[in-house]
Image (cartoon, rainbow, N blue to C red):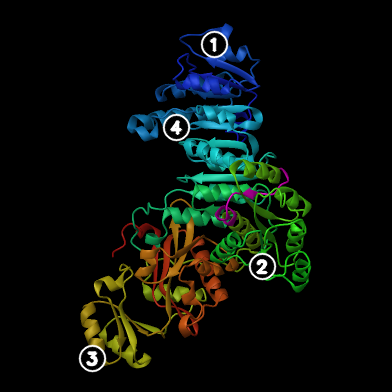
Amino acid sequence: MTTDLTPLLAPEGVVVIGASRQAGKLGAAMARSLAPFPGARALVNARRPDPAEGVYASVAEAAAHTDGRLDLAVLCVPASGCAQALAEAAAAGCRAALVCAGGFGEAGPEGEEYADELRRVARETGVRLLGPNTSGFFAPHLGLTASFVPAAGQLPAGDIAVVAASGGVNHALSFDLVAAGNGISLGVGIGAGLDVTAADVLEHLVEDSRTTAVALHLETVPDGPRLVAAVRGLAVVKPVVALVVGRSDIGDFARSHTGALATSWRTTRAALRQAGAVVVDDERELVDALTALSRIRLRPLSDPGLGIVTAQAGPGLLLADRAGTDGIRVPELTSTTRHALSELLPPLTYQRNPVDTGRPAETFARVLDTTAADPAVDLLAVYALTEPDSVDLASAAQDAGLGADSPAVVVVGGLPEDVAEQRARLHKAGVPALTGPASAANAVRALVTDARQRASSDTEGLPSEALVAVPAGPLDEDAAKTFLAELGIRTPDRVACDNRAEAHHALRRLGGPVAVKVLDAAILHKTEIGGVHLGVRTAEELDAALDAIGPDRRYLVEAMAPAGVDLVLGVRRDPVFGPVVLAGLGGTAAEALADVAIRLAPLSVTEAATMPDELAARALLDGWRGGPVLDRAEFGRTVAALAAALAASPETAEIEINPLRLTADGLIALDAVIVPTEETDHAQA
């Protein structure tokens, strides 16, 4: 099957199979939508052909009357007839097809049979198939509207592509983007994705010169590694903004804490972010992000500085406050810049950053230019009302040279018609214009996130040291910790004991206090069965602990670790994305609050070291109330080593350290579980 989507998304000719004269039918709607298409067009209605009106009895007849230029077949027939219609279209020379009908996999066993047959025909003929169960796609530059939504044909051409799991979301996002002053280069609803997936369209967009930024909407991911590779390849040349559905669907909890926390929604978002996409929380943020990223893109920077110029103090405060919340640096301007501003602005205005101009005057353009030129400023955010008698905002921005070489976002306030006029002029000049401080803050965050992610990908690489594979299992806690030590991860002094006498000898050797645990590779959660006893100091306390654990057991007697902050660190095989790593604060709070960071594995030490910065409770790792401070480099080495070990061990399903304690002397693994692949579904609690 060809990987080229040109016959689908930029065909020379289109044929509608199942065209109808009844206005409310799908085939009639598609025929109307495709009527303006300047390429070859034909309609097929086997029951009521009318060649004089361009309606033919078969695709072969239609192809004969269009010199065989019918690349794309739009199937408007019931699910039961789609496979046969596709086969006939392929035989007539069509190389791509769009199937809008439902009634396939979502309709039960009979629908599954229809889907299997359609997939088989597509595979055997090499025809690229979009759908089924989608409202279609549109390419305004080509005058091509293969959608049954009438208004889609009125979308203006532009440079933002939309790739959405849902045809309805494809249309909704496109309309929202246009309402914000943008145009669309391509809008694709994937639907059921029997053949063409989001990854296919993303790969196609790499070479699409009309597209400068891409909106990606996901509901499910059929092939995680393929999607990640497609996003990574596209994000290098043009920004990708991703919205993932499923925040509230946490799915079935796995037995381990790692499985419970690494939900599909979180894992998908983490994977996309790691691949270079800007991940957003809702449609409004997506529109704001793309309004900016389709026009400007910061150079790769680990910590871009934001300059704020506001003609009204209050909105400037909103921008500055949100920047602080988003962790974006608002640096104080240099003395040289402040001196230059003092000659342009009234003395009572604030000029350190944000720069409050008061009511803007004829010096506004020079204020913008001066602030943007400050060496600490990488991006400028501007707020002003439409006041034609005071300043023409669009002209001021252009006079200041704002645009691709001097990145800025501009907020225009005022009456809708005045704002629309200013916004259109700013967009024409390559300056993203937003209509409120919140939208501008969304745009700023997207630009900064994109710059940071590209700076990270520019500098990092995977560990070059030899990978250490997990030994053949099953492994109990002592064996698991021995393996961790091989990876350079510190563990407490301990003694594995086969009987009570050896346990007493271990207590005398280690001295109190010690932890006494049941030692059994089949028991993953020892505390739940009373298999862990802490702070044991005397022979009597040891006997009591051993009695509670039970006879005929093996025991682990281990030196107690100093106090500190407990984390959980785990690597597991995600069913969609493969090896992933999860880190969070230990204990039940991490699971209840889902305060975790996730990455695909293997990963570099540099990337791993950034994970704690995503945690809401990260302050606990930075010396909270005199506590220990996490060495990010040590943490990065620990995570990268564990992730590399899983990647090198196909027979291992999961490795978890819980807790991994942060102490004044660094990190130490207090408990470890290694689960072989074949035992994932049978592990005992």
Residue at the disc numbered 3: 540
Q: Earlier in the sequence, mark 4 or mark 2?
A: 4
Residue at the disc numbered 4: 133
User: What is the CA distance from the residue labelled 4 to the residue labelled 3?
Assistant: 70 Å
> Closer to the observer: label 4 or label 3?
4
User: What is the CA distance from the residue labelled 1 to the residue labelled 4?
Assistant: 25 Å
Query: Please, what secondary structure does the residue beneath circle 2 have?
Result: loop
Q: Nearer the viewer, residue 266 or 315?
A: 315
Q: Write the start and end of the magenta stretch as one range.
A: 428-441
Q: Residue at x 30, y 69 (%)?
A: 523
Q: Earlier in the sequence, mark 4 or mark 3?
A: 4
> Closer to the observer: label 4 or label 2?
2
Please rate how many residues cluster around mark 3, counting C-alpha atoms within 10 Å: few if below 14, some from 14 to 19, many from 20: few
Residue 143 location in percent, x, y?
A: 63, 27
Q: Cβ–Cβ below 8 Å for labels 4 and 3?
A: no
> Closer to the observer: label 1 or label 3?
1
Q: Cβ–Cβ below 8 Å for labels 1 and 4?
A: no
Q: Earlier in the sequence, mark 1 or mark 3?
A: 1
Please rate how many residues cluster around mark 2, counting C-alpha atoms within 10 Å: few if below 14, some from 14 to 19, many from 20: many
Q: Cβ–Cβ below 8 Å for labels 4 and 2?
A: no
Question: Is any atom of residue 128 visible in this view?
Answer: no
Q: Earlier in the sequence, mark 1 or mark 4?
A: 1
Residue at the disc numbered 2: 353
Residue 24 location in percent, x, y?
A: 44, 20
Residue at the disc numbered 1: 56
What's the residue type where badge 3 is placed?
Glu
Q: Earlier in the sequence, mark 2 or mark 3?
A: 2
Query: Please, what secondary structure does the residue beneath circle 3 have?
Result: helix
- Image quarter where the C terminus lies is bottom left
Q: Which mark is residue 76?
A: none
- Image quarter where the N terminus lies is top right
